[in-house]
Image (cartoon, coloured by chain):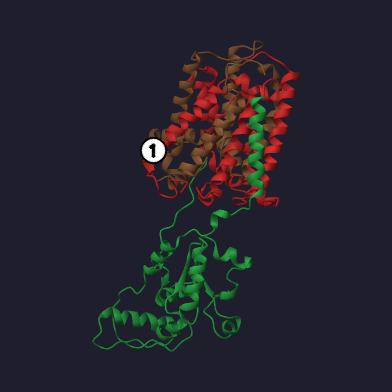
Amino acid sequence: MGPLLPNELISNNTNFLLAFIIGIGFGFVLEASGFSSSRKLAGVFYGYDTVVLKVFFTGAIVAMLGMLFFSLFGWMDLNLVYINPTFLTSVILGGVIMGAGFIMGGFCPGTSVCAAAIGKIDAMFFIIGLFIGIFIFTEGYPIWEHIYKAKFLGFPKLNELIGISQGFFALLLIIAAFAMFWLGEKAEKAFPREEY
Amino acid sequence: MNPRLILAAFIITLGLIIAAVPENTTKQYKLTANQLLDEIKSDMQFISTDEVADMIINKDPSIQLIDVRSPDQFEKFSLPNAINIPLVSILSDEWTDVLDQDVKMNIFYSNGTLDANEAWMITRQLGYENNYVLQGGLNYWAETIMNPKAPKSTSPDDEFAKYDFRKGASAALGGATVSNTGNTSKKSTKPKIKRKKKKKRAAGGC
Amino acid sequence: MKKTKYLNPYVGGVLLGLVLLAANFIAGRGLGASGALKSVVVEAVDVITPKHAENAAFYKEYADKHPDGPMKSWLVFEMLGVVVGGFLSGAIAGRLKFKVEHSPKITSKRRLVFAVLGGILFGFGSQMGRGCTSGSALSGMAVLSVGGFISTAAIFGTAYALAYFVRKNWI
């Protein structure tokens, strides 16, 4: 049955309409969880507010479990789902640059759009920065093209890399996430601050 | 009780279940008997000897010939670059990667069509795509490609074109010698391959 | 737990997971954000200097992969939804207000300068890393992609490592 678009059960235009609706859900959840506040987001790096950690990992776990169960029931063919490619050099380099941008700017692209929607001016400036950054990348593409395409490892899954089943890996990830949540809540008690 | 703990217990339980159940259950028996019958009736799995000969000569990298006969027979004669997967070992794990993939088109062949067709039915039932059967098997291959018969002089042009192609293929693949039939028809003999429309993995990226 | 004006983070997480699951179930792909902004950049370059867009390597490659044009993409529609969804949530909770959020220790100007600088880095990094926190880290982890985990570790690891130096901006 699923995924619906690759299985040609819905047209491209329906898919775009559904993308819009999914986006509304995405934006609503981000804003309602407090991701529209840069000081709340940055809190995770100082321990006073770990909402990012909790929402982010709970979201990843729920979606992962959902997909594994859908696949188990035969509702969804995981072979048709997009798996992010792994280009080792660029993913590390890009991640490091993004990390620096995150702590300086206080947003990531998704949350900045969401925050700009409720009138945060710092988020609007962040988005201007994003456009400039992307423009620098596209303009200077020939300079970093070889880095961008270096060390292509295909579409590996982490559980295959360490040789365990997807289900068992999911369980380990859940346990790891719970350990992080526990640490996060301890940190919140250790560095209490009023909510922004 | 704390709602967080209820949620945590719920997620842990789901995690334990998913860790305990075996994977890949989605691969099994993808087609119902009716769907399989429909596919068989439509002869979608067959590829003609001409198409295969053309692909071999052009060194088409997208095909993989699979000989489902016994290793003895495979030793005596096989098509170029074919691999041997005897019908009895078609379910062996060793060959899963070859049979269940979406890069190359696998073409099963045996002496007739019987064994190759059985191999196709088994793999199709497992949900594997991209497997096909050489129409008529090696017997028909020998008849059409290795020793093609000249068509009657009253035959339509494309019969001659086909014959020319087969003569050429035969020479290229080590059969009888070439002799032009004198037919000047330049009609393309490149056979059309009826590939099934494939479902593609969704495109993504941020 | 202390009282909060926001949704419980775990409930928020479950909802986010369901949205991500819906995206994967319907479109066979995860969520994203920076891709939509890239579409806007490419479209803008296309409109302003079409000649340049035809010649520069990146735009050519992009056009090859996106025959329908940059704006007709799943992510663009999704991000339009994000604007609407964020606005709705803010409106319901009474958080619609133009303001610059910053630590009392710094000026608004400093905050905005850092926002632009951070944006530039994040924009560049998201292209280099093929996706941002949503597209690469979150969606990648949900499908167990190795790249997703590396990306998550690199983003959060670097941010933690650098957090000390810009603490004045936040605390």
Q: Can residue B94 be seen in this view?
A: yes
Q: How many marks?
A: 1
Residue at 68% over, 47% down: A168
Q: Can residue A129 be seen in this view?
A: no
Q: What element carries label 1?
A: helix
Residue at 41% over, 62% down: B34
Q: Which quadrant would residue C168 be assigned to in this image? A: top right
Return the x and y of residue A192 as percentages of the image width and height. 72, 16
- Quick one: which chain is brown? C
Residue identified by numbered label 1 = C50
Q: Which residue appears farthest toward the front when viewing the image? A: B1
Return the x and y of residue B151 as percentages of the image width and height. 30, 87
**Side of B77 where C166 appears, left or right:** right
Residue at 54% over, 45% down: A70
Image quarter (top left, top right, bottom left or bottom right) of the N terminus of chain B: top right
Q: Residues within 10 Å of mark 1 (few under 14, many from 20)?
A: few
Q: Identify which residue, C64 or B196, lies in the foreground.
A: B196
Q: Identify which residue, B57 or A24, lies in the foreground.
A: A24
Q: Which quadrant would residue C68 be assigned to in this image? A: top left
Q: Please tell me whether residue C52 is drawn above or below residue A187 in the rendered image.
A: below
Q: Please tell me whether residue A86 is drawn above or below residue A119 in the rendered image.
A: below
- Quick one: which chain is green? B
Q: Which quadrant would residue B188 be assigned to in this image? A: bottom left
Q: Please tell me whether residue B101 is drawn above or below residue B1 in the rendered image.
A: below
Disc 1 residue type? Pro
Return the x and y of residue A123 as percentages of the image width and height. 54, 21
Q: Which residue appears farthest toward the right when viewing the image? A: A190
Give chain A's shade.
red
